[in-house]
Amino acid sequence: MHENTQGLRWLRATAYNAFAVGLGILAGLAVVVYAGGNIEVALSSLFLDPIRSSGGIQQLFVLFVMFYTMALGVGLALKAGLWNIGAQGQFLAGTVMVFFVYIYLGFLPWPILYVAMILGAAIGGLLWITVPTILRVKFGANEIVVTILLNVVAINFGFYMLSGPIKSPGTALGFPITTTLPARFQIPNIVASVPITYAVPATVAIGVIFYFLVERTPFRVKANTVGESAETARYAGISIPRVMAITLLTAGALAGLAGATYMMGYRYELDIGSFSTNYGLLAIIVALVGRKHMLGIGIAAFFFAYITFGAESMAVATNVNSVVVFAMEGVMMIGILMGNYLTERKKAA
Amino acid sequence: MTVNLSDVAIAVLSTTLTLSPFYLFAGMGEIVSEKSGVANMGLEGIMLMSLVTTFIVDYLTGNPWIALFAAIGTAGVIGAVFAFFAIQVRLDQIALGLAIYLFGLGFSLIVFNAAYPTGIFPNYISLPPIYSGWGTVPVIGTILLEQNVLVYLSIALVVITALFLNRTSLGLRVRAVGENPKAADNMGVNVPKVRFLATLFGALMFGVAGSYFAGNFVPGFQTNIIAGRGFIVLAMIYFGNWKPYRVLFAALSFNMVYALQNEYISISGSSVASVSTLFNMLPYVFLLALIPVFGRKARAPKFLLKPYKKG
């Protein structure tokens, strides 16, 4: 009986989420129709483009890795009631660090430098969230406000690094771009002909490790207690600063790591185009849709990668600006929040 | 190269004031909203939609005043949707705010592209200075007398907001539903209604801010043109401890640091991007540095972000 009601609840939650996504897609289609686009073309690119070409598959898995890595961190912090709105800034710090290490530690031999670049990116993200963490833990300053501020700083900092310290010496004067990483510093495909890199299994492995470290240990309860009530946490003898610091710093390191996989597994060079990506913000939605659960986030990440790339190709195919994706995801997010609310209410009833 | 210091001072002070209405209208709106217990993180999305509305209506009517009120209308509609979901349905305010932001981020450009398919941008007629003949008055002419009317209104709004929150019974009710909605409810205050009105007022002010962005910050329109300036308002409020005059101080000092670095870059004539980008960080780093100093005593309304359910 218990199993049955649980199954029912899961089914209901899925139905609500599907409805929310449908709503978002409808909003996108409305824009396409208004712009005079062909609805058949729109639908086929939305649903099939992520799987029907090798370019599509590549994009799908790049987005999946981005969303999964960053949302793990965002979700972990959310468990402790902390909003890391700054994943985008930490991600940018990570991308910058990849090239910083590549250039300034260039004397290291290949395998060591390779690892150092990945670790450097994680450390970059970690450093970027250190200020909000200290301000939060030591001064009680609101982490939302500080991480948002640091997103703006990250963009300017990235511009600065690009126009000087990590700028490619070979480019035209003033053009801010790094050198392209040579092939041996790129993350290779698992099968040469299929554009799925080793970053994908590595990310899934990280997700599984986090599942066991977080969901299957007392840490889950500790974090949740801190997130729900500081008073209860104190009463239970949980060190609130410690839980906060661990979750926030981990979130920063993961977002930085995403910067490494993005640079070394996909873009290979850093220019201002990477600054206007919005993965950090979308990772928050992914974490919420995955209900802060380390495995749920993986599923949500794949799903959102699919929808995001599908919607982008839909926009290209129908000559609509690809920002329509943001509008669609905004609508989806409201729908999903509604769905969560309705599911919780049924549970409470 | 000789630099006339008094010219620099005038330019800096003038820019400081010119940029202020954006932060002050948004800041006062968000203060009132947050005092009632509702944080609207979708403010930048609302501003983007208001900005686009301003451009379109300004172009159609040639009247910046009508454009301003149309922008306020757009903001009101989105604000009402936000308020409904946040207060009646009791969705998570932060997540909902981000959803509204994403929506505005995408939809504003879609609307803009639909209005101007060629991508050619029409002339924007901005609100005129109250009286342009005063520019000749030494020193204070350009700084104080030649500003746009919204500059004066925004400073008046700070005073009005402070008086409203601290001296009026409706202001008391706004604070009550943010500090202790249960007690307020017991005393016969309609909690959802007060919260709804406060949140709606906030959104309307975001409309003014978004509209003011046109012609006073970056020209034209593109994706993410406000670039986080809306979110900065949240930091200013935090730094200002939800007090209108302190938020005024935060906004003015932030703008002054901005104006100073801007002026420095243009005087030094440095075209090196690396220098200017480093200086562009200053206002934000300045605000950040103030947080451990002044933010320590910051105390948010007790029921901020917490939905209220009767019974």
Image (cartoon, rainbow, N blue to C red):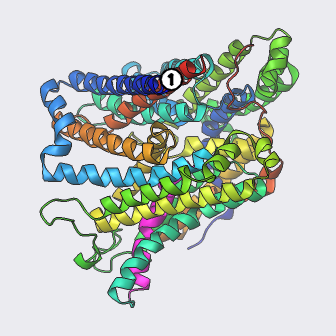
Q: Residue B250 location in percent, x, y?
A: 73, 47
Q: Is residue A278 left or right of residue A62?
A: right
Q: Is residue B199 left or right of residue A176?
A: right
Task: Identify the subunit bearing mark 1.
Answer: A
Taking the image as drawn, is residue B212 in sight? Answer: no
Q: Reply yes or no: does residue B21 show up in magenta.
A: no
The residue that label 1 is drawn on is A343
Location of residue A131 with respect to B79 vertically, above or below: below
Q: Which quarter of the rendered picture does the C terminus of chain B lie within?
A: top right
> Which residue is drawn at the image coordinates 64% and 65% (left, top)?
B4
Q: Residue A148 location in percent, x, y?
A: 58, 49
**Quadrant assignment, res B60:** top left
> Which residue is drawn at the image coordinates 51% and 20% (left, top)?
A342
User: Over which residues does the magenta segment extend?
Assistant: A84-106
Q: Residue B270 location in percent, x, y?
A: 48, 70
**Quadrant assignment, res B140:** top right
